[in-house]
Image: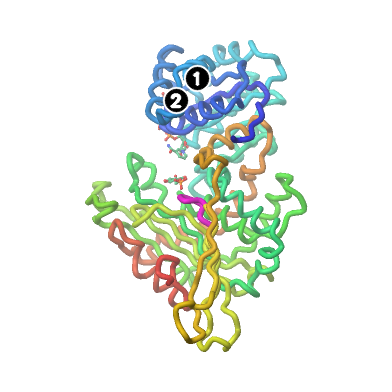
Amino acid sequence: MEHVQQVEPFDYVIFGATGDLTMRKLLPAFYNRLRMGQIPDDARIIGTARTDIDREGYVARAREALERFIPDDVRSSVLVDRFLSLLHYVTLDGTKADSEWGDLSSLLSQAPADRIRVYYFATAPQLYGRICENLHSHGLVTPHSRVVLEKPIGTDMATATAINDGVGQYFPENQIYRIDHYLGKETVQNVLALRFANPIMNTIWSGEQIESVQITAAETVGVEGRASYYDTSGAMRDMIQNHLLQVLCLVAMEAPDSLEADTVRNAKLAVLNALRPITDETVAAETVRAQYTAGVVGGQSVPGYLEELGQPSNTETYAAIRAWVDTPRWKGVPFYIRTAKRSAHKVSEIVIRFRSAPTTLFGSAPAGNRLVIRIQPNEGIELQLNVKNPALDAYTLRTADLDTAIRMEGGLPFPDSYERLLLDAVRGNPILFIRRDEVEAAWRWAEPVLNAWSENKVPMQTYSAGSYGPEKSAEMLAAKGDKWHEDME
Ligand SMILES: NC(=O)C1=CN([C@@H]2O[C@H](COP(=O)(O)OP(=O)(O)OC[C@H]3O[C@@H](n4cnc5c(N)ncnc54)[C@H](OP(=O)(O)O)[C@@H]3O)[C@@H](O)[C@H]2O)C=CC1
Ligand SMILES: O=C1O[C@H](COP(=O)(O)O)[C@@H](O)[C@H](O)[C@H]1O
């Protein structure tokens, strides 16, 4: 049984409450937490958007969303009704000072003044600053208020700065929670436990023993209904600048002195600041970008990206980068990061490849050990070891896997990362949220690559939907005697 503690009563105000994210992720996440007994009876979830509907209209939409996104076996009509009773709705244009702020204000003023108030921005990020300004001018920012910002925090350094400045004018940094849902994943959080709670890992966690690191997030889906967003973003902005760099930080950071949020964030920031800049001179060797063409995924024929989009595009659906963390610990260790839409499999994983044993005892050099941290699916940890080959007379080696699944007690699936993050904002625990300087350091590293790509300094490759990516990507690893995980024996 999941160990849960009820959070304090709260008012959660969602801007963008009629949108895809709210319906698909946020409301189901709240429902699941209510099901686990974590939501107090007097909590309120207040949806706002411009769509002119009343509370009943909103409740009907929310009910539909739960029917769609909560599996039958965990959806009970009693719990659904209890959940829907927490919902309120205010028709409001968050960007207009003369919109229905009075309605929101009078609803909020029904709760005690010291009630925890979370403003969740599930709208386009360009609106965040104006919504904050309006919250402030209508007296809705209390000492117990905090604001949760959805990604993307900008599309480059300038736009990220504008968003951060806009919000930062009205909320101090310690009241700003920038979501990165990868940090809410149980197996991503596990990286710290694996590294720092196990001396056997801790002592081998450096370039002395580690030859290379791979971080992959591949998906079988294409751009689904989000082509208009995705085509302005691409794989680098959508996945690498945020999620995969955060994972890299957890793999590469020095041990923090405590699990206090800023201590951990300082350790991550040090990694981001130590990333070797990719320049016009190195970008062609250290990066690969590509678009998928028509192919077969999961037995189904699917169109290519450009056909789906219906127009030409210079946006990558695949990106692979060889990154270097210039610290003594990681001297000479390449970090290969890649992400893909329409890949052969859905897999997010970290692969640590250790150096092989310097021995001639067994004839040829034994294979280097390999540690695979499976973020999703089949969450778990696998360690590949060399053992004696029992079937042969000669003393030869083969590999064997120590494989442990990481599961909830009772084999239940892990809670969705939004469940953890939504309530961490209520708890006032920012450890799994990104600080402003982390966002900026990530842009500082990513922007030169994006600029070089937009100037076509790196040719756009293609890969068939349902494949593992373009040849060029395998070649980038082969140049250092390496292989992607799926190509290793
Ligand atoms: N969908 C997803 O899976 C993910 C989304 N995100 C991010 O979450 C945010 C929302 O995405 P998504 O839900 O897909 O987008 P949608 O377009 O589906 O929803 C946008 C929401 O914003 C509301 N809105 C738009 N303008 C205003 C305004 N001026 N005042 C108040 N509300 C407004 C819309 O309602 P109305 O038109 O009625 O005002 C709607 O509820 C974006 O930043 C996106 O990048 C991040 C990760 C995943
Ligand atoms: O943030 C995003 O993440 C999803 C992938 O998330 P995952 O938890 O399924 O790995 C991705 O599909 C989307 O494009 C991106 O915006």
Examine the rendered structure and indicate whether residue 17 appears above or below residue 348. Answer: above
Q: For this rendering, which residue is in front, 401 or 478?
A: 401
Relative to 79, say whether 392 is above or below: below
State left or right for residue 184 relative to residue 465.
Answer: right
Q: Say which residue appears at 60% left-offset and 75% top-offset.
A: 332
Residue 389 sits above or below residue 324 on the image: below
Q: Secondary structure at mark 1?
A: helix
Q: Which of these two is toward me, 197 or 73?
A: 73
Quadrant in the picture for the N terminus:
top right
Residue found at the very far right of the displayed protein: 257
The residue type indicated by label 2 comes to: Arg
Name the residue carrying label 1: 79
The residue closer to the viewer here, 73 or 268, is 73
Query: In which quadrant is the C terminus drawn?
Result: bottom left
**Residue at horizontal 64 percent and vertical 49 percent from the top:** 437
Residue closest to the eye, 75 or 486: 75
- Compared to residue 355, the image places residue 291 above or below, namely above
Which quarter of the picture shows residue 429?
top right
Tell whether circle 2 marks a residue whose Cβ is less than 8 angstroms from ligand 1.
Answer: no
Residue 378 located within the stretch drawn in magenta: yes
- Distance Cα–Cα, label 1 vs label 2: 7 Å
Helix, strand or loop at disc 2?
Answer: loop
| Quarter location, residue 288 | bottom left
**Circle 1 crowding by C-alpha within 10 Å: few under 14, some 14–19, many from 20:** some
For label 2, the residue is 75
Q: What segment carries the magenta color?
A: 373-379
Q: Is residue 480 visible?
A: no
Give amino acid for label 1: Leu
Pointer 1 with pointer 2, Cβ within 8 A? yes
**On the picture, is 98 further left or further right than 474?**
right
Residue 244 rendering spot, x and y as whole percentages: 52, 54
Judged from the image, the quadrant occupied by ligand 1 is top left
